Amino acid sequence: MVRKCFLTGELIFFAEERAKRPFNYKKIHVANTPRQFCPFCPENSNMTPKEVYSTEDKLIKIVPNKYPFISRNDETHYGIHDVLIDTNEHDEKLNQFSYEHMTKLMNVIRYRVENLEEDENIEYVQVFKNQGIDAGASQSHSHWQIAALSVIPTRFKRMMSVLEDYYIKNKNCYFCSLDYGDRIIEENEEFIAYVPYDAKFPYQMFIMPKKHIHNFKLFNDLQLSLLGRILKHCVMRLDTMYENISYNICFYNSPKRDFNEDSFHFYLEIIPRIGHMAGFEFSTGCHINSVLPEKAADVLRGIKI
Ligand SMILES: [Zn+2]
Ligand SMILES: [Zn+2]
């Protein structure tokens, strides 16, 4: 079976037989930086640049990235690269955070997105989390990264124009008119977690606000707490399925200006890193997914949390 990604036009080949191959799922690598060398543990705060923000209780901090890929001093590609350290506990993972902790985390992200957008040179803010070595995390201590850019990435621009075209044609936002079918994992008053019809990776999940909201900074306090709750549940499901699994969380937030607010809808994506991207994917931009979205949703929904 082949499906086409609505947003990017990439093809996804579903091949359930491939899940039976030996070594289909990579061994889970657990790398742990010894606590005494961990720059994100509170006692080692001298190892990171001075914090730019901290919650009153010092539970969550934002520090400049010590190894940034963008800088305020770069005249052609101005940018700000933050690390958000979301816990003081060296081994505590997102799935273990309390609901209150998740709400606090969502509040800090909202504050920082809004704050970075106030910078005249910033056009686009990317929030993401790399959890685990297979997801690209260089530190085992839980953290997020926030990259504020003076340009809107090309892939993102393309997605925005696809959504805008849909809006013009249908007089409605694509995500607001979506039929989730039997791919819903969980929902609450404000959010829905589901496996997209065109999932590129096994057990890939989207979390979507039910109301049409284009930017993370516009969520109210209740929405942030419900988003924290459903996000925690999603990563709990993954961790129950594969303990210590690596995953990425990516926010899709509207740029600061020059876009159609009615056609862009905020969402976030969780990508479990259990398969391999290999030659075919790199050379063609297509994906091979060994788990059908409908089956993935069924499994994820069935996990007791
Ligand atoms: Zn640590
Ligand atoms: Zn919408």
Image: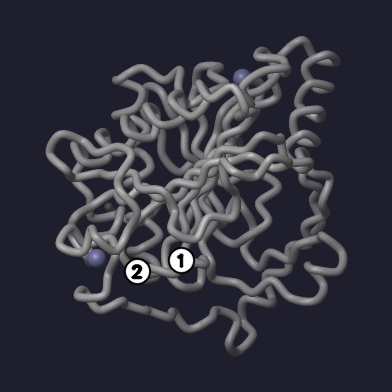
Q: Is mark 2 within 8 Å of ligand 1?
A: yes
Q: Amino acid at mark 2?
A: Ser
User: Which disc is residue 60 wearing?
Assistant: none
Left/right of residue 298 with respect to residue 228 in the rendered view: right
Give the residue displayed 49% in from the left and 38% down from the top: 207
Check disc 2: other Cα within 10 Å, few if <14, some if 14-19, many if 20+. many
The residue where tag 2 is placed is 140
Question: Which is nearer the eye, 78 or 172?
Answer: 78
Is 149 rendered above or below residue 280? Answer: above
Give the residue displayed 66% in from the left and 18% down from the top: 257
Q: Secondary structure at mark 1?
A: loop
Question: Which is nearer the eye, 260 or 181?
Answer: 260
Q: Amino acid at mark 1?
A: Ala
The residue where tag 1 is placed is 137
Left/right of residue 132 with respect to residue 100 in the rendered view: right
The x and y percentages for residue 38 are 27, 69
Residue 102's image quarter? Answer: top left
Give the residue displayed 76% in from the left and 26% down from the top: 163
The x and y percentages for residue 304 are 29, 54
Is 217 rendered above or below residue 290? Answer: above
Question: Which is nearer the eye, 68 or 164?
Answer: 68
For the view shown, which residue lies furthest in the top direction? 171
